[in-house]
Every structure is written in structure tokens, then in C-alpha cells.
Image: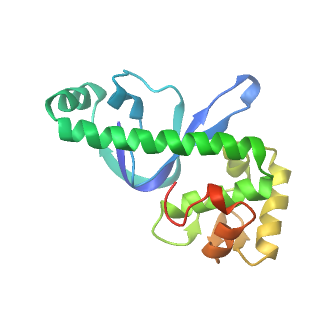
Amino acid sequence: MYFLEDGIASVVAKLPKGRDTEVGLIGMEGMTGALVALGGDRAAHDTYMQLAGSGLRIPAPALSSALSESTTLKALLLLYVQTLYIQTSYTALVNARSKLDERLARWLLMCHDRVRNDRLAITHEFMSVMLGVRRPGVTVAIQELEGRGLIRATRGEIVIRDRDGLFQWPMAPTASRRGI
């Protein structure tokens, strides 16, 4: 289990033939292996570091032991699991019902929530995996957001220029100002 201090990790569900999709995003607010807090012994999905960072590591058996000894710790981690569950359910809803540019705007906001500046070192290819779409579609969506002055895209980097504009991009109810 890793408790991130900075950086971003992506929880990725896998399907055959490489059709992987991000189902959760973890930053300084969270931890990997959240199922351990529910009594599980392993993660259901793969987790990848998306943006480099640092964190604290604890073996799952040690955390399980600490959870059995501290109701306060257990309650706190269960609140995080609830938050991750809500994030995952909104991700499923948005992926099923929203256009790619809307999904990308939400995803960029979620990444921005988890970093301490406006720069995201991320490639179009990686965004396409996270959003479960083809790379050319991500490029078109980036151009749309960039054309509106919401972001600036360069090779391997996205700069958030107008967070409020991204938030108001057609689907404000599924994004947050700073949160899920």
C-alpha cells in the first residue's frame, strides 16, 4: 500500500486485447490498494504512476494489523474508500454518457486537483489509455479545449490555463472545483 505525498497514480481496469481504461485516480489525498481497508488481500486492478511523485509504503499485512487496532484509522480509510467508490461511479457515468472533450475536461480537472501546479507532464498516448479511446480522438479533444483557451498543449505537457472554464465545459455537474 502506498500513501502518495505527490504525483498521480491511475487505477486501470484491463480487458483482453489491451482495451484498458482508467477507473480511478489517486493523488496526495489517497492511497493505493484501498481494498485492504475493506479486508481484502490484493488489488482488483493494476495501478500505475501517471505523474512521478513520492509516497509512504506499508505492507498490506501491517496495515491490516493497524486497522484492527485503531478504529479511528479504520474509519478514516473507509471514508477514503467511499470517496474512491464515488469517483469510480462518476467515471463510469461520464465514460458512458459524455462526449470525449467533456471527459477530457473532467479528467484534466481531476489531475489538476492532485498536483501543486498547473503543469501536467502527460502524453496524448497515455491520455488515450486513461480515457479508453484512440489517440487521434484525444488530439482532437485537446485541440478543442486549447482553441477555447482552457489549456495549452505542448509535446508531453498540458498546462491548465483556465480551471473555471474547464469546470464549466458542458458538463459541470460531474466535475468539482476541487474534489472528485
**Residue lying at the far left of the rendered structure:** 69
Foreground residue among 109 and 118: 109
**Residue lying at the far front of the rendered structure:** 173
Foreground residue among 24 and 19: 24
Q: Quadrant of the N terminus?
A: top left
Measured from the top left, where is residue 103 in percent x and y?
72, 53
Residue 154 picture quarter: bottom right
Q: Would you say 96 lies left or right of 35 here?
A: right
- Seen at 68% across and 56% down, the residue is 123
Foreground residue among 76 and 155: 76
Measured from the top left, where is residue 161 in percent x and y?
64, 77
Measured from the top left, where is residue 127 in percent x and y?
69, 51
Image vertical order of residue 40 relative to residue 56, above or below: above
- Seen at 61% across and 45% down, the residue is 90
Residue 158 picture quarter: bottom right
Measured from the top left, where is residue 133 in percent x and y?
78, 43
- Seen at 63% across and 44% down, the residue is 91
Specify how the rendered protein is coloured.
rainbow
Foreground residue among 50 and 33: 33
Q: Would you say 45 lies left or right of 158 here?
A: left
Q: Would you say 170 lies left or right of 47 here?
A: right
Instruction: Residue 22: tell me if it is visible.
Output: yes
Instruction: Residue 57: tell me if it is visible.
Output: no
Q: Would you say 64 lies left or right of 92 here?
A: left
- Seen at 72% across and 43% down, the residue is 95
Residue 83 picture quarter: top left
